[in-house]
Amino acid sequence: MTRALLGARHFLVPRHHPRALIVLMTLVGAMLVVISAGVGSLHMSAGRIFGHLLSYLGMGTSPLSDLEASVLMSIRLPRVLGAAAAGAVLAMTGVLMQTFFRNPLAEPAIVGVASGGALGAVTWIVTGHLLGPLMFVPTQFALPVMAFAGSAVVCVAILAVSRDRDGQVDATTMLLAGIAVNAVTGAGIGLLIFVADDAQLRDLTFWGMGSLANISWAQLAVLIPVFLVTVLFGLRFSPILNALLLGDSAAHDLGINVRLVKLSVIALTCLACACVVAMCGVIGFVGLIAPHGARKLVGPDHKVLIPLSLVLGAILLGLADLIARTIVSPSELPIGILTALAGGPIFLWLLKQRRTER
């Protein structure tokens, strides 16, 4: 079944050498991580950073001063690695949602999944002292759990509204539902901001526009496993995700448990999106731009689409973070503003392109 599916003409990779392209873009992403780690008020060259990292392996002595080493290891490196991991996770959620809805316009921020997670997180920030006794998880996990709950509720609601009588998801209804959900969650967040105190307001500003300033090694310890789970899921089930593009009936005829696969996609999308929202706030359009760019380069086969989307998402968010903390230095521009400025026009162009193709 898998060989027949991947061998079908519809899924052949056009014109390009996808594995070479994936390797090339991975090297570009690695270079971006090292360069970004050295950019800031305390400049460090890539060579000196490599030298410091090699010193951890017992290969020579570190060329960095104690202050530079502390800034690199405590602030810069967790942030740039967090940007890469978060960008890859957001790209993966975009791929999964586009496959689930069979629509390239689906993306967590557009259809409201990200804003649902933000509403859950903000609810905990403002009312956590009241909800604490009702939670069945340790306090340190309450924020991501609430974000997951908000994302899950929104995802299920949009799916229920978007299905037609035949069980197919209508793209126009999905987008309209996303607009309505974003409006409702925005109103809910606005209400919580209205009743929040000054200390809570400072925290809530972070959720509305997105930021990577608070990424630490402890948060990376949570984000990296989520990243690995999404990667393993995508690569392991890429033939099945290909089959979903053919429609539920065709996938069922190929022996696939469509209901189980879709439940897994929903759960993983909500988990990944909630994790990023809990740590970085709402960062939109990465899940739209990265998969769309990858699809243009290597086609729709998930076996190569997923790895390239992950790398492009990491590069995109890493580059956006670099610009955000340097363009108005010594201040910092919220990263969500940059991704929205880039993603909004691309989304409109995709809408126009789809109307032209009909």
Image (cartoon, rainbow, N blue to C red):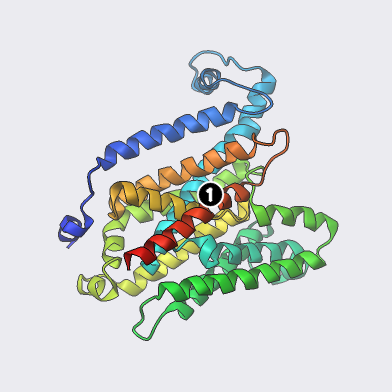
Residue 152 drawn above or below residue 304: below
Q: Is disc 1 surrounded by few (<14), some (14 to 19) or many (20+) residues within 10 Å?
A: some
* Disc 1 secondary structure class: helix
Residue 166, by quadrant, is bottom left
| Left-right relation of 112 to 240 | right
The image quadrant where one finds the N terminus is bottom left
Identify the residue position indicated by label 1 in the image.
342
Extreme-bottom residue of the structure: 165
* Residue 204 visible somewhere in the drawing: yes
Residue 246, by quadrant, is bottom left
Residue 16 drawn above or below residue 265: above
| Left-right relation of 276 to 237 | right
* Residue 137 visible somewhere in the drawing: no
Q: Position of residue 165 (x, y in %)?
A: 37, 86
Q: Position of residue 51 (x, y in %)?
A: 52, 18
Q: Which residue is found at the position 55% from the left and 71% from the top?
A: 154
Extreme-front residue of the structure: 356
Q: Which residue is found at the position 35% from the left and 68% from the top?
A: 261
Mark 1 residue type = Ala
Residue 169 drawn above or below residue 277: below
Is 88 in front, or is 128? 88
The image quadrant where one finds the C terminus is bottom left
Q: Which residue is found at the position 64% from the left and 47% from the top?
A: 211
